[in-house]
């Protein structure tokens, strides 16, 4: 029996109007996926002009069978819960759901292990990738499609829309990193973890830690304990320095791994070694330990390359580091060895390459190592001399691009910047973005390049706030250079997306430099 209760019609009509009004209140930005301010810029974005609404009922489904993928689903939920206040249950599933958020592995999608496909309809958000890594990067994209307030740690007013459409994405370079110099000034585990979180948000995947230099040794080596107990006692300016115990270092490495970031430890040698030389007399040619050093000169120290004990030292150090390094790379430094005669430097680098390879790791060195005979898997990190890079390329080595004049994060933005140095010139946000690794140095072609890394040397920075002032907002540019093909990159378009990230960096508590080359006021 049909019943015609006027009241039911009225309620239905009222609800219908409410939905219309709500749909009508959805802004252009919220409905147009192509207007999402994603950094790095994805390879392809096609909007379909509607929205998926995350609400109290939304469930995050994860295809069963992969703990790593489940971890990515839980990561997404953890990042969305604080601002939305929604439960966002995470459930394993054997089949794709009708609605909600669905993470799945699809080995066949040809986006590589770091790529992903994100398909958003009004009912279902499907994130597919050939590996959990790609799904993790798809999650960063989801976070950046949502309004900036999603990054707030406290409850925010919704609504929480994802514009509908499809994003297919994967990186141009496989090595996208930054370096943190923890030797000139020491930074504790919590500070480095915060940096790791920011790096992951921008899809960076390599963290190079400069663990030893003239001013400090920062990693416990059990077979040579004085390195940290003496060599770790100070830093530039005479502060208390510090070091990571192997347990703390392993915690850092695991944390980075959970954000799909590989840690690359560097022990700089034969130069930049005063902290080791002050810790063990036998490493010095004159058999006398040096004094600890708290200045900022470079190029005055050298291990005694003629002594066999030095190679035992190097073998022991890299043996312990290799055991602490799940990643494929160990970095030997090799830069500014002005106190080492070239005829001693060349055989030294040859031997160190053998030592590192004997521990099953690939060696990276600053571009000077190209003066020696590079082994086939050795990687040269270009920072200053194009001629060294050319020598490395001629020997078939891959190059990590870290050109000081474009990518050194310790370079001042301009002459008014208090922190940082300027020996390689000033690097404003636009200069840090406006270059292409594959055409910067004629001798270095795209096929020679492993990727890009932006080093932050810490002579002039003493805490995380100061680190952030130099790193952000330039790091986002390097992340985009490493991920997005040069043909899709354009400063005038990028700066609008970067402006939107001002609110995101504020929400994430990042002390960034509000450069006036970025139109922060256009942050919508
Ligand atoms: N060059 C030195 C660093 C640091 C840097 C500061 C390299 C490879 C100048 N070596 O860059 O130790 O002092 O900008």
Image (spheres, rainbow, N blue to C red):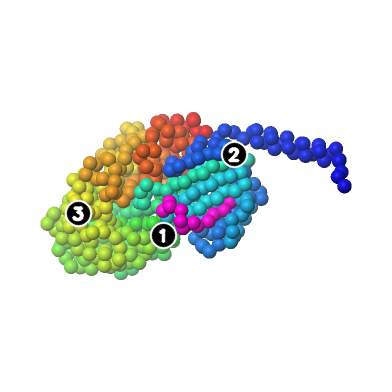
Say whether residue 113 is left or right of residue 272. Answer: right
Label drawn at residue 50: 2
Secondary structure under the numbered disc 3 in the rendered image: loop
Find residue 107 and report its horizontal and vertical position in percent. Answer: 46, 58
Q: State the CA–CA distance, disc 2 to disc 1.
A: 41 Å
Q: Can residue 14 be seen in this view?
A: yes
The nearer-to-camera label among 1 and 3 is 3
Quadrant of residue 405 in the image?
top left
Q: What stretch is highlighted in magenta?
A: 101-112
Say whether residue 409 is left or right of residue 384. Answer: right
Q: Residue at position x 86%, y 40% from top?
A: 5
Q: Residue furthest left?
A: 343
Mark before the other along the chain sequence, 3 or 2:
2
Q: Is residue 470 visible?
A: no
Quadrant of residue 345 in the image?
bottom left
The nearer-to-camera label among 2 and 1 is 2
Look at mark 3 in the image and give the residue it sits on.
395
Q: Residue at position x 42%, y 33% from top?
A: 493
Label drawn at residue 253: 1
Secondary structure under the numbered disc 2 in the rendered image: strand
């Amino acid at each position: 029996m049909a019943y015609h209760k006027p009241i039911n019609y009225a309620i239905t009509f009222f609800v219908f109007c409410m939905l219309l009004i709500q749909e009508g209140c959805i802004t252009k930005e919220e409905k147009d996926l192509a207007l999402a301010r994603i950094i790095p810029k994805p390879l392809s974005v096609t909007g379909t002009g509607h929205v998926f609404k995350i609400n109290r009922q939304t469930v995050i489904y994860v295809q069963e069978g992969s703990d790593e993928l489940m971890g990515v689903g839980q990561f997404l939920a953890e990042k969305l819960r604080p601002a939305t206040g929604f439960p966002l249950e995470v459930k394993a599933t054997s089949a794709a759901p009708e609605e909600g958020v669905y993470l799945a592995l699809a080995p066949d999608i040809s986006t590589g292990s770091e790529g992903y496909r994100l398909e958003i309809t009004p009912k279902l958000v499907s994130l597919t990738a050939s590996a959990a890594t790609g799904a993790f990067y798809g999650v960063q994209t989801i976070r950046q499609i949502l309004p900036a307030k999603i990054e707030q740690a406290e409850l925010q007013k919704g609504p929480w829309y994802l514009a509908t459409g499809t994003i297919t994405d994967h990186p141009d370079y496989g090595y996208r990193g930054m370096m943190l110099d923890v030797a000139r000034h020491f930074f504790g585990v919590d500070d480095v973890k915060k940096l790791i979180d920011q790096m992951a948000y921008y899809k960076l995947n390599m963290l190079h830690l400069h663990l030893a230099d003239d001013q400090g040794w920062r990693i416990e080596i059990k077979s040579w304990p004085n390195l940290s107990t003496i060599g770790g006692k100070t830093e530039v300016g005479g502060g208390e320095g510090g070091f990571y115990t192997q347990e703390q270092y392993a915690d850092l490495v695991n944390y980075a791994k959970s954000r799909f970031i590989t840690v690359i430890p560097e022990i700089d040698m034969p130069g930049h070694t005063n902290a080791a030389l002050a810790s063990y007399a036998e490493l010095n040619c004159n058999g006398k330990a040096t004094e600890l050093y708290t200045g900022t000169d470079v190029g005055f120290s050298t291990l005694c390359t003629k002594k066999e004990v030095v190679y035992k030292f190097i073998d022991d150090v890299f043996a312990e580091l290799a055991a602490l390094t799940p990643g494929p790379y160990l970095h030997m430094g090799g830069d500014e060895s002005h106190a080492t005669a070239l005829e001693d430097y060349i055989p030294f680098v040859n031997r160190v390459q053998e030592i590192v390879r004997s521990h099953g790791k690939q060696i990276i060195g600053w571009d000077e190592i190209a003066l020696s005979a590079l082994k086939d898997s050795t990687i040269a990190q270009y920072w200053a001399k194009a001629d060294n890079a050319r020598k490395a390329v001629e020997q078939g080595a891959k190059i990590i691009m870290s050109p000081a004049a474009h990518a050194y994060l310790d370079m001042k933005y301009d002459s008014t910047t208090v922190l940082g140095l300027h020996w390689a010139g000033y690097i404003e946000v636009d200069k840090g973005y406006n270059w292409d690794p594959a055409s910067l140095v004629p001798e270095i072609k795209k096929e020679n390049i492993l990727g890009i890394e932006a080093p932050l040397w810490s002579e002039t920075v003493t805490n995380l706030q100061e680190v952030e002032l130099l790193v952000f907002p330039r790091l986002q540019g390097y992340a985009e250079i490493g991920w997005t093909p040069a043909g899709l990159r354009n400063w005038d378009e990028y700066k609008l997306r970067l402006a939107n990230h001002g609110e995101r960096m504020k929400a994430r508590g990042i002390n960034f430099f509000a450069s006036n080359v970025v139109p922060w006021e256009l942050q919508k």
